[in-house]
Image: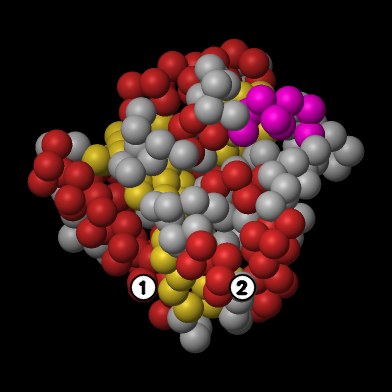
Amino acid sequence: MSESHIRARDLNWRADASPQAQAVAVAGHIEAALKQAIDERGRASLALSGGRGPELFLRELEKASLDWTRVTVTLVDERWVPVEHEQSNAALILRCMPGALQRASWVPLYRGEGLEVDADTAHRVFETLLPVDVLVLGMGADGHTASLFPHMPGLAHYLSAECEPLCVPVPAEGERLARLSMTARMILTARHKLLVITGEDKRRTLNRALEEADPMSMPIEAFLSAPMDIFYSPEGAQDS
Ligand SMILES: O=C1O[C@H](COP(=O)(O)O)[C@@H](O)[C@H](O)[C@H]1O
């Protein structure tokens, strides 16, 4: 890992030998931050990413001894598909944390009202959650995070602090489904930001993002600033 870059940006880096150890550490970190928010403000909010990465730590988080009735759970991004679809991020969260979500206030992003309408609805809900207490990012091998993809139309605006919408529609492209994504104004203001990555490939991607410092080609770079805790395990969860 590019330690000088990590230090220069004041990022907290934690490496765990196995995906299971990483999952326990991530869930523990989220649990502590949510408890702190409940103690301080009576309520807590949690925004989760989807994809292949989160499954193990979500299953650990499900076991947390938290008052979930005081927690609002939502998504950093979503594929614009109903929950029955195999690529739905909501489906992953509901499958891995059924008990917690029965008690928590669950805010899905997909509502089936149209891509733009659903983005606008999510924007209005996000306004009530700003700043979110705990926000967990993942990262694709191409350096995308949330559903902010390299060089996609509108990216520079979505990454800027001046972008008014907190959630934007991302039209389908090629094989990629249409999506909904948080923008930088929502992501960067989170009280606790986590990035969870597994596998050597993703470590190399992160290194490149830190070294090249070009958020248009690697959007994750826009979010690599303190406060951020990065959890890394060299063995990919999907390979275990
Ligand atoms: O498409 C997505 O990709 C990223 C990374 O996912 P992974 O499968 O490579 O772990 C994820 O953070 C995002 O929420 C998801 O919609």
Residue range highlighted in magenta: 152-159
As helix, strand or loop, the secondary structure at mark 2 comes to loop
Residue under numbered circle 1: 24
Residue type at mark 2 is Ser
Label 1 Cα crowd, 10 Å radius (few <14 / some 14-19 / many 20+): some
Residue at (57% x, 38% y) in the render = 77
Q: How many marks?
A: 2
- C-alpha separation, residue under disc 2 versus residue under disc 1: 25 Å
As helix, strand or loop, the secondary structure at mark 1 comes to helix
Instruction: Indicate whether residue 119 is drawn in magenta.
Output: no
Label 2 Cα crowd, 10 Å radius (few <14 / some 14-19 / many 20+): few
Pinpoint residue 232: horizontal percent, then vertical percent.
52, 72
Residue at (46% x, 32% y) in the render = 186
Residue under numbered circle 2: 2
Residue type at mark 1 is Val
Q: Quadrant of the C terminus?
A: bottom right
Position of 127 with respect to 236 (left or right) is left
Pinpoint residue 55: horizontal percent, then vertical percent.
50, 62
Of the pair 158 and 103, the residue shown nearer to us: 158
Position of 75 with respect to 141 (left or right) is left
Q: Nearer the viewer, mark 2 or mark 1?
A: 2
Position of 201 with respect to 222 (left or right) is right
